[in-house]
Image: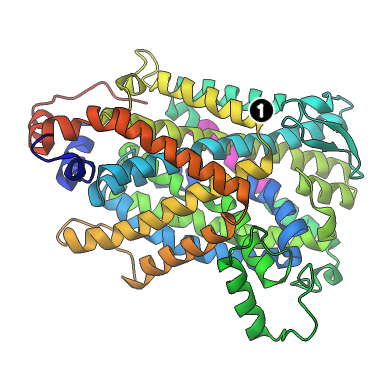
């Protein structure tokens, strides 16, 4: 390392050829086909975003314009998904965007990506668990079983009844904590078993969402969609031009301004709503973490990523239209807005069915997110950036069990003691920053590795990755206007960089041995017991 220098060392890139060699000699068992990957993506995408955050985003930020918010976010995710599909087919590894960054921008950027992915997957699982807790509590109330309200919310958070009246303040969210721990135990048993459970749950969840759209459509009141974009609150000064062109310009300048308060309603609110419900789409790229366990990644990874995204986008927009057409958007500030809507319809058996489907669906999302996080840590541990114990494989279950236990405990802690709003915002910040880097990575590898095999190529290059970067940064600006979110993110990233210089820099295999030595070691490796 002395020959390279610290500055050169932290930007040392992991050769693409070395990543391919590690994949060829990996321990992970290739058991997942195209259908498994599509269902894995759907299992992760359809969850808290649609079952929980949609209601709050409509009530607080976008009004019925939440439908437009989903179109904006879906368009952005289409750009990002095309970039992910190219990278996942060319570099089928468990590390997802972490590995892509290591190959393109160097070790320090890969480490930062690892920090962002911890927000995207670890905190996302906690966010989902809080939504899961809301539906569990609603279903138990229907069965006349009551969990003390103080045990259903984060410390100090107001707990409201069905009429919106505050009845208590939370101590910690017990159901959310227990839900994460249960999913952690399932992941320790093995991904094949987990994938089977996930497939069953996904079919149940899809059936419930489609039933909500089909039955709920008969109870829609079209007048509730008007105005599609409610006036901005507070209203702009008298005499302010409010034609469409001026509204668009005002929304853009509002996002880019230094104000700490995002817009409520208006086009600015629709844009901030798009940033908030961005969480709803996160799951599509969780498919990329299964690259090393895909039977035919060159063909199956793009199918899994793009197929899941297209299916879910259609269902999302339809669900939003029904939701805000049944219940006035002002009444949707609830942890279980779909439950509010089905209660409004008044069909008892349907309400129970939807709540059971939501609980099952959110369970599968927790499973996929925790699965993705453990595989990223597994890859980082193999690279020496994290302790080797995180790559230890259970002798019986063939899973990275120590890694899974640690991730599960940390996620359970956040689920039990942090509010839904904060968890969702921080998850989105990490995801948007990570997605911007992924889009930039496609451009970098096209320039530096022109001849690399790419079974899938991002169409309309370089327009698609450039638009992906710009849209991610634009929505990111909307989120970091919130002071608490910005401060937490900056402290988290700062401490993460300190950990890299204290541990990762000195233990990195690439830094200690160099790419040539590592490639020689991989060439001499035999086959290993597969990880399930």
Does 243 sit above or below residue 191? Answer: below
- Total marks in image: 1
Asked if residue 294 is positioned above or below residue 434 in the image, the reply reads above
Q: Is residue 446 above or below residue 143?
A: below
Q: Residue at x 17, y 56 (%)?
A: 452
Residue 232 in which image quadrant: bottom right
Q: Position of residue 215 (x, y in %)?
A: 79, 56
How dense is the environment of label 1, judged by Cα within 10 Å: few (below 14), some, or many (20 and up)?
Answer: many
Closer to us: 218 or 523: 523
**In percent of the image, x 56 and y 49: which residue is there?**
486
Residue depicted at 59% across the width and 51% down the height = 280
Foreground: 259 or 178? 259
For disc 1, the marked residue is 416
Q: Is residue 206 magenta?
A: yes
SS of the residue at dot 1?
helix
Q: Residue at x 62, y 66 (%)?
A: 271
Q: Is residue 297 left or right of residue 251?
A: left
The residue segment tinted magenta is 195-208
- Tell me the quadrant of the picture where the N terminus can be found: top left
Image position, residue 420 (x, y; %): 68, 41
Q: Main secondary structure of the magenta part?
A: helix
Tell which residue pokes out farthest to the top in this image. Answer: 395
Q: Position of residue 304 (x, y in %)?
A: 42, 50
Q: Horizontal and vertical percent for residue 403?
A: 41, 23
Report the front residue among 428 and 358: 428
Front-lying residue, 389 or 245: 245
Is 103 in the magenta? Answer: no
Q: Is residue 99 left or right of residue 436?
A: left
């Amino acid at each position: 390392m002395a020959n390279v220098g610290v500055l050169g060392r932290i930007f040392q890139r992991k050769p693409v050829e070395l990543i391919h060699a590690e994949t060829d000699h990996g321990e992970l068992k290739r058991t997942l086909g195209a259908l498994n990957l599509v269902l894995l993506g759907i299992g992760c995408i359809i969850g808290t975003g649609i079952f929980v955050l949609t209601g709050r985003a409509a009530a607080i930020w976008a009004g019925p314009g939440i439908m437009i918010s989903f179109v904006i976010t879906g368009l952005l995710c289409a750009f990002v998904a095309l970039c992910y599909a190219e990278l996942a087919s060319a570099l089928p590894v468990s590390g997802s965007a972490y590995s892509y960054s290591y190959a393109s921008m160097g070790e320090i950027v890969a480490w930062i990506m690892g920090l962002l992915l911890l927000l995207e997957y670890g905190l996302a699982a906690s966010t989902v668990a809080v939504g899961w807790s809301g539906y569990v509590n609603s279903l138990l109330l229907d069965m006349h079983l009551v969990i003390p309200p103080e045990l259903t919310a984060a410390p100090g958070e107001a707990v409201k009844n069905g009429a919106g009246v505050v009845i208590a303040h939370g101590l910690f969210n017990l159901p959310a904590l227990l839900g994460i721990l249960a999913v952690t135990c399932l992941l320790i048993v093995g991904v094949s078993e987990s994938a089977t459970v996930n497939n069953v749950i996904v079919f149940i969840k899809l059936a419930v969402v489609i039933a909500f759209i089909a039955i709920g459509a008969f109870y829609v009141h079209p007048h509730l969609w008007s105005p599609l974009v409610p006036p901005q609150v507070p209203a702009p000064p008298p005499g302010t031009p409010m034609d469409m062109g001026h509204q668009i310009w005002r929304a853009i300048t509002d996002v880019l301004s230094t104000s700490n308060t995002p817009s409520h309603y208006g086009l600015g609110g629709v844009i901030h709503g798009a940033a908030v419900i961005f969480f709803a789409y996160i799951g599509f790229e969780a498919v990329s973490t299964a690259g090393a366990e895909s039977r035919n990644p060159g063909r199956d990874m793009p199918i899994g990523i793009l197929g899941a995204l297209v299916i879910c986008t259609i269902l999302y927009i339809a669900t939003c239209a029904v939701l805000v057409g049944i219940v006035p958007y002002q009444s949707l500030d609830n942890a279980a807005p779909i439950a509010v809507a089905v209660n409004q319809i008044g069909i008892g058996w349907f309400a129970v069915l939807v709540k059971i489907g939501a609980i099952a669906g959110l369970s599968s999302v927790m499973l996929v997110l925790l699965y993705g996080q453990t595989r990223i840590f597994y890859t980082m541990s193999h690279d020496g950036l994290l302790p080797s114990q995180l790559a230890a494989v259970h002798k019986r279950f063939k899973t990275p069990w120590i890694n899974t236990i640690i991730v599960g405990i940390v996620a359970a802690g956040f689920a039990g003691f942090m509010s839904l709003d904060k968890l969702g915002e921080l998850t989105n910040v990490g995801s948007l920053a990570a997605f911007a880097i992924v889009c930039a990575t496609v451009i970098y590898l096209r320039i530096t590795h022109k001849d690399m095999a790419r079974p899938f190529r991002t169409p309309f290059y370089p327009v698609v990755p450039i638009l992906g970067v710009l849209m991610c940064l634009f929505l990111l600006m909307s989120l970091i206007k919130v002071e608490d979110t910005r401060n937490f993110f900056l402290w988290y990233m700062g401490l993460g960089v300190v950990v890299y210089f204290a541990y990762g820099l000195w233990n990195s295999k690439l830094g200690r041995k160099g790419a040539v030595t590592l490639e020689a070691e991989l060439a001499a490796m035999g086959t290993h017991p597969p990880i399930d």
